[in-house]
Structures are given as C-alpha cells and as structure tokens.
Amino acid sequence: MPIFGRGSGPVTTPHLRRKLSDNPLKVLVKIAAIPIMPLLFLWMFGGPALLTTYDYRGRESAPNMIKCDYLTLQGWRVVRPSSGVNQCAGITLLPFDMQTFLEMFYD
C-alpha cells in the first residue's frame, strides 16, 4: 500500500490529465490563432499611426491642415485631409495593406 494513498497508477495532477486528454485539433487551432488574430484585427480596424509632422495654411492659432506625415507599421505615410478638415489626429488608425505587410516577410 502506498504511503499517501495515491494508488499504483501514474502520478499526475487533474490539470495535467485534462491537458493530456485535450483534442489535438483544438490545440492546433489555439496555436494557429496566435499569429492570425493580430493580423485579423489589423485588417479589420487598421494599423496604428503616429503623427510626426504636418503642413498647414492659415493662421497658427486656427490652422487648416494640408498634409500630415504619419509613422506606421509599414513605414511613412502621407495623408492629405479633405477640404474643411482642420485637424490631423496625433494617434490614429489608418487602413492597413495586408499584402504589402506580408511581402515584407517573404522578400
């Protein structure tokens, strides 16, 4: 008889037994979701962009923005606001070109 009453079977914890009995397909789907989910969010919502410089016309107290330079995950991007829009957001989400982004890894 074992000293602590564990029986003669292999020594495992309930957590380990549950993990060992998981469906392999579920495990593969979870592993595949790790790189796919961030790419899906970039495609749906756009990538983050940080305003670095801008050009304007008019008075400094009430500028009319004509060109905004943003630093994005894909490099520099120039945005020209439409007429009547007086502001370039400091941090924004810009449309993300997934094909260009993936080509960076496969050149």
Image: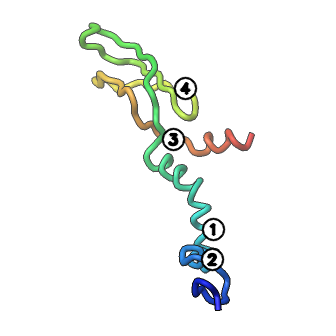
Kind of residue sitting beneath label 4: Trp
Q: Residues within 10 Å of mark 4 (few under 14, many from 20)?
A: few
Mark toward the start of the polypeptide (1 vs 2): 2
Q: Which residue is mark 4?
A: 76
Disc on res. 28: 1
Q: Residue 44 at what x, y percent from top left?
A: 45, 50
Kindly indicate whether the residue at mark 3 contacts the one at mark 1 (C-beta within 8 angstroms). no
Kindly indicate whether the residue at mark 3 contacts the one at mark 4 (C-beta within 8 angstroms). no
Q: Residue 73 at what x, y percent from top left?
A: 55, 35
Q: CA distance from mark 1 to mark 4?
A: 36 Å
Disc on res. 20: 2
Q: Residue furthest right?
A: 107
Q: Residue 63 at what x, y percent from top left?
A: 29, 14
Q: Residue 13 at what x, y percent from top left?
A: 57, 76
Closer to the eye: label 1 or 3? 1
Kind of residue sitting beneath label 3: Phe
Mark toward the start of the polypeptide (1 vs 3): 1
